[in-house]
Image (cartoon, rainbow, N blue to C red):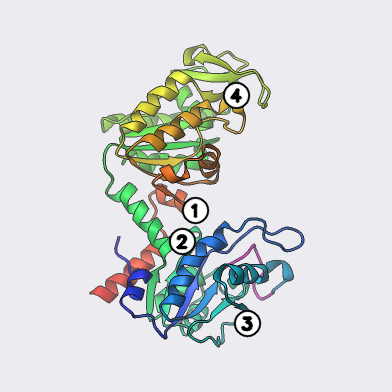
Amino acid sequence: MQFIRFSDLCEQDQVRGKRVFIRADLNVPLNDQGQITEDTRVRASVPAIRMALDAGAAVMVTSHLGRPTEGEIKAADSLAPVAERLSALLGQPVRLQADWVGGVDVAPGEVVLLENCRVNVGEKKNKPELAQQMAKLCDIFVHDAFGTAHRAEGTTYGIAEYAPVACAGPLLAAEMDAISKALQAPKRPLLAIVAGSKVSTKLTILKSLADKVDGLIVGGGIANTFMLAAGLPIGKSLAEADLVDEAKAVMSAMAARGAAVPIPTDVVTAKAFAADAQATVKAASEVADDDLILDIGPQTAQALAEQLKGAGTVVWNGPVGVFEFDAFAHGTETLARAIAESSAFSIAGGGDTLAAIATYGIEDQVGYISTGGGAFLEVLEGKTLPAFEILARRASAELN
């Protein structure tokens, strides 16, 4: 994927004295007192800002926060708590500026945080007039918010069309590199884990991956629907009977390529969905009418673990069981540890997946952990994200 890297511009001394506009993802949770309760996104934004400062730039940063009404700024929508946290992390004052579209006074070495960009009229619909005004504020636009890369808004797309230079910041560039490595030029065999409660929410992902991967491991309610498609009983487990034909189509598409969707040979069941429910391991063919399947069985988990250990590339989205309940966490833990032990390049994304990675303490053993949420899922669906498209187009124009 062709794009201009902000890091390259800094190394080539093309940033000194320039006005740099960074679109970060600072959409952090706040409590009722307006205090940040979890600052991962703020900390993740610091490398791009520090890179710009060290290169001698005058730095402007903006982000959305929550769901404000365009044209109105309320205290609950303000980036004021973020400005305070950024000041502490950077070790220098970060001034917050409202009504910034008409002009920003910032000197090299300074950082100005531009108030919630979704307050600006025309931001969400990417109005060209707004994008052109914002582009005039800077010499270099830096997109560093992968979590917004699937949205074509004023500060994520429009400004990149009109800014003198448009490039990817270190966070976005790392995501683009990891996605390219995993899906565009993967080392084989390429295995994907797609798990979740419903096939319907991830059907397009399953269909897209069926054309690419060498093995498609399904889990959760999705696996139950595939078990139905394979003619196995699932009791009263969560499934979508109306999508059995879709599951069969995915299995057929995989088989036609000599690939497979491994169907569980054993499962862990319970009579109720509860943390203290008694867990029973059963052959997949022996699930009773009043059983709930809450995890893959140890035999299945071990077989899948062996496949993962021999993979060249692994894409992981979703735990394969109800890992929040200890009795039904064995499958997810087994696969997580297999990914950690594998020499494969692995990329993982999705909130539940990140929670599982944190639970088992394997953050340092996963090749790349995507922070994108919806953007990561759209990549798996085979979509070209708007941010990737515009940055590639601008790079092509620059280089050609």
Q: Residues within 10 Å of mark 1 (few under 14, many from 20)?
A: many
The x and y percentages for residue 225 are 49, 28
- What residue does disc 1 label? 371
Q: Does the residue at mark 4 contact the one at mark 2 (Cβ under 8 Å)? A: no
Q: Which residue is mark 3?
A: 99
In the rendered structure, does residue 68 fall within the stretch colored magenta? Answer: yes
Q: Nearer the viewer, residue 314 or 12?
A: 12
Which residue, given by chain and number where applicable, does mark 4 sit on? 327
Q: Secondary structure at mark 4?
A: helix
Task: Please tell me which residue is depicted at 57% across the width and 72% down the height of the picture.
Answer: 91
Q: Can you say whether 17 is above or below 92 in the image?
A: below
Residues at circles 1 and 2 in contact by the CB criterion of under 8 Å: no
Q: Which residue, as the protein is rendered here, is positioned at the far left?
A: 400
Q: Which amino acid does the dot numbered 3 rest on?
A: Asp
In the rendering, at what x and y percent does residue 228 appear?
48, 23
Image: 213 above or below 368: above
The kind of residue tagged 2 is Ala
Rounded to the nearest angstrom, the CA distance separating label 4 from label 2 is: 38 Å
Residue range of the region highlighted in magenta in the rendering: 63-72
Q: Quadrant of residue 398?
A: bottom left
Report, in whole angstroms, how far the alpha carbon at label 1 lies from the one at label 3: 30 Å
